[in-house]
Image (cartoon, rainbow, N blue to C red):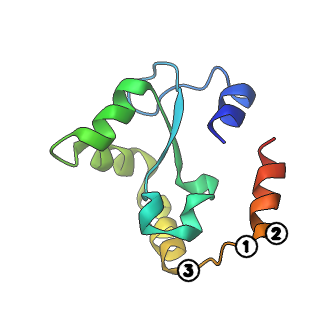
């Protein structure tokens, strides 16, 4: 999936610092929601440095800044989607693989 975004959006900028985005950060961690693991609403374009800060900062400054930039409507949509359960099947994964080829 990361390769797809790098290929299809090679000039996309980091949401936080406007350097070149090299990864799509899962705002809601994969372990917290099967439903949001594959949903583009949860993918935040970040550069390597900001992605590192998002995962290893001792505070939640990066998460708070992303939330502020993306807005309350986006945060509310994530909260609602997080409540939904998604059963991962082979058919579903095949569809995801095809989508990101």
Q: Secondary structure at mark 3?
A: loop
Q: Secondary structure at mark 1?
A: loop
Q: Is residue 67 above or below residue 5?
A: below
Residue sitting at 49 percent across and 59 percent down? 74
In the displayed structure image, the side of residue 56 where residue 48 appears, left or right: right
Residue sitting at 35 percent across and 49 percent down? 68
Residue position for label 3: 84
Image quadrant of residue 34? Answer: bottom right
Residue position for label 1: 89
Kindly report the distance in space between the C-alpha atoms of the residues bearing marks 3 and 2.
19 Å
Considering every residue shown, the one lying at the far left of the view is 58
Residue sitting at 60 percent across and 26 percent down? 12
Image quadrant of residue 1? Answer: top right
Query: Contact, CB < 8 Å: mark 1 with mark 3?
Result: no
Residue position for label 2: 91
Residue 7 point in image, percent of width and height: 73, 26
Pick the quarter of the image with the C terminus: top right
Q: Is residue 46 above or below residue 77?
A: above
Query: Contact, CB < 8 Å: mark 3 with mark 2?
Result: no
Kindly report the distance in space between the C-alpha atoms of the residues bearing marks 1 and 3.
16 Å
Residue sitting at 32 percent across and 41 percent down? 54
Residue 56 point in image, percent of width and height: 25, 40
Crowding at mark 1 (Cα within 10 Å: few <14, some 14-19, many 20+)? few
Considering every residue shown, the one lying at the far front of the view is 90
Image quadrant of residue 10? Answer: top right
């Amino acid at each position: 999936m990361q390769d797809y975004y790098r290929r299809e959006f090679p000039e996309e900028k980091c949401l936080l610092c406007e350097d070149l985005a090299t990864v799509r950060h899962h705002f809601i961690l994969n372990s917290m929601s099967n439903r949001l693991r594959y949903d583009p609403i949860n993918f935040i374009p970040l550069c390597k440095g900001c992605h590192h800060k998002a995962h290893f900062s001792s505070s939640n400054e990066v998460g708070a800044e992303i939330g502020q930039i993306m807005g309350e409507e986006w945060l509310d949509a994530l909260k609602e989607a997080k409540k939904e359960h998604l059963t991962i099947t082979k058919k579903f994964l095949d569809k995801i693989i095809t989508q990101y080829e």
